[in-house]
Image (tube, rainbow, N blue to C red):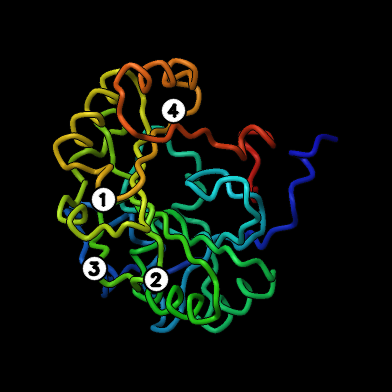
Amino acid sequence: MTRAQQAPTTNVMPPTLTEPAPSPNGAELHALDERPNRLRPLAGKPPGTLVVHEIYRSIQGESTFAGLPCVFVRLTACNLRCGYCDTPHAFTQGKTLGLDDVVARALEHGDDLVEITGGEPLLQPEVFPLMTRLADAGRTVLLETSGAVDITPVDPRVRVILDLKTPGSGEVDANYWPNLERLKPTDEVKFVLCDRADFDWAADQIRTHRLTDRCPVLLSAAFGQVSPTELATWVLESRLPVRLQVQLHKILWDPAARGV
C-alpha cells in the first residue's frame, strides 16, 4: 500500500441532508443569484454553525508557506465551478458543526499554521468569527478564497490568498475586482493557469493592477494541463517578479488523495 493510500486520518464528513432555503447572510456575494442550487448544502444551517467538509493536518502544498505543517479546515459549498477543480467533493459533502467545536478541532492538532479553505469558505458568515478566534489563539491564519466574494469583513490579521479566476477556469466573470484594492502586504494573489492564453491574461492583470507592488503573486500550472517546466520558461521570459508554485501535496501523495 502506498503512502497516498495511507493518507493521514481525517475528519471527512458524510453528506448532510438539508432543506431548500435562501442564500446565507453575511458576506457580500458577487453574481450568485442565478446559482442558488450551488448554495443548497448551506440551506437551513442554524446560526452559529458551519458546514464542514473536513478538518485535517498535512503539509501546506501551496502559497509562500508551502512545506510547513498546517491544519486545514475545509468548508462545504462553492458558488463556482472551475474546470480544473480538484475538490468537487466539497461542493455538497459536509457535516454541520458548532463554531466552538470547529475551533476546538482546529486547535487540538497543535500546529501554528491554520488554513481555512473550501469550496468557497466565505459563503458561510460564521467563518469570520472562526478566523478571528483562531488568530486570537495565536495561530497564523491563511484564507484561500476564490476572489468572487468581498474580503472586507476578514480579520486584518488573516493572510488572504486570493485566487483570481482566469478565462481558462470558466469563471473569469465571477472575479470581484474591488478585492484588489483591499489586499494587504501580507496577502497573496494566485493565478491557476490552463494555457498560454491564461498566462498572458494573468501577466496583463499583474501589470495593470500593479499586483506585485501590493503583495506576493503566485503562478500555478493547472494540474495535467500545463507543464510546470513550460510555465517556468514563460515566467523567465516575462521578467515578472512572481513566484512559480507547484502543488506540493500532489507530488508527495497521489494527486487524487483526499485529506492531504
Q: Point out residue 130 in the picture as x, y percentages from the top left corner.
A: 45, 76
Do we see residue 13 in this rendering?
A: no
For the point 29% across and 21% down, the residue is: 238
At label 4, which amino acid type do we have?
Ala
Q: Earlier in the sequence, mark 3 or mark 2?
A: 3
Q: Point out residue 126 in the picture as x, y percentages from the top left corner.
A: 39, 76
Residue 219 is drawn in which quadrant?
Answer: top left
The Cα–Cα distance between marks 4 and 3, rounded to whole angstroms, is 28 Å
Which residue does the numbered mark 1 point to in the structure image?
214
Give the structural element (helix, strand or loop) at label 1.
helix
Give the structural element (helix, strand or loop) at label 3.
loop
* 57 left or right of 66 in image: right
Which residue does the numbered mark 2 point to in the structure image?
157
The Cα–Cα distance between marks 4 and 1, rounded to whole angstroms, is 22 Å
Q: Quadrant of the N terminus?
A: top right
Q: Earlier in the sequence, mark 4 or mark 3?
A: 3
Give the structural element (helix, strand or loop) at label 4.
strand
> Do the residues under discs 1 and 2 have CB atoms within 8 angstroms?
no
> Do the residues under discs 4 and 3 have CB atoms within 8 angstroms?
no
At label 2, which amino acid type do we have?
Arg
Q: Point out residue 210 in the picture as x, y percentages from the top left corner.
A: 19, 42
Which residue does the numbered mark 4 point to in the structure image?
221
* 51 left or right of 194 in image: right
Which residue does the numbered mark 3 point to in the structure image?
152
Q: Earlier in the sequence, mark 4 or mark 1?
A: 1
Residue 204 is drawn in which quadrant?
Answer: top left
Q: Could you classify mark 4 by the number of other residues whose Cα lies within 10 Å: few (under 14), some (14-19), or many (20 or more)?
A: many
Outermost residue to the right: 1
Q: Could you classify mark 1 by the number of other residues whose Cα lies within 10 Å: few (under 14), some (14-19), or many (20 or more)?
A: some
Q: Earlier in the sequence, mark 1 or mark 3?
A: 3
